[in-house]
Amino acid sequence: MRIIYLFLGLISVSMAALGVLLPLLPTVPFLLLATFFFARSSERLHGWLLDHRTFGPMILDWQTRGAIHPNAKKAATLSVAAVFSISLILQLPFKLLLIQAIALTGVMIFIWTRPNG
């Protein structure tokens, strides 16, 4: 199982790295997933991720207090607004827009009700 967890952790870090470059792909959820997998497969990679200058504080905030930094909340809000705007521009069917609006509203409520990191 350690090899599988290691492989999944590496994939998660790769997806998080893509999320840094692509505005609509989330970064932090993939980092949290990588942390989970590395904790079960590689102490060295787990420690590297927790000690990372940029990502470590976000992960530790989430693990210790379930907190999200205000800048991350703002970035998530901008991403959600961009996704919904693209859907409007593409003139998706009303039912699809409604489902998307409900789901994205739920995500935003969850994010903004977390403590600030």
Image (cartoon, rainbow, N blue to C red):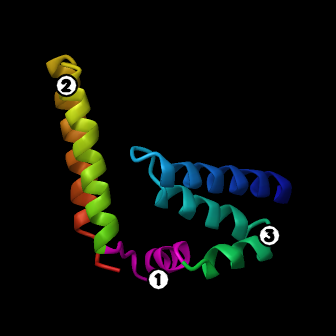
Mark 2: give few (<14), some (14-19) or many (20+) Cα within 10 Å.
few
In which image quadrant can residue 65 be found? Answer: bottom left
Q: Which residues lie in the magenta part?
A: 54-69
SS class of the residue under badge 2? helix
Label 3 vs label 2: CA separation? Answer: 45 Å
- Disc assigned to residue 45: none
The chief SS type of the magenta part is helix
Q: Residue at x 70, y 79 (%)?
A: 47
Residue underneath mark 1:
64
In which image quadrant can residue 74 be found? Answer: bottom left
SS class of the residue under badge 3? loop
Q: Is residue 20 above or below residue 104?
A: below
Mark 3: give few (<14), some (14-19) or many (20+) Cα within 10 Å.
some
Horizontal side, residue 26 vs residue 55: left or right: left
Label 2 vs label 1: CA separation? Answer: 40 Å
Front position in the image: 35 or 48: 48
Mark 1: give few (<14), some (14-19) or many (20+) Cα within 10 Å.
few
Quick check: is 66 in the magenta stretch? Answer: yes
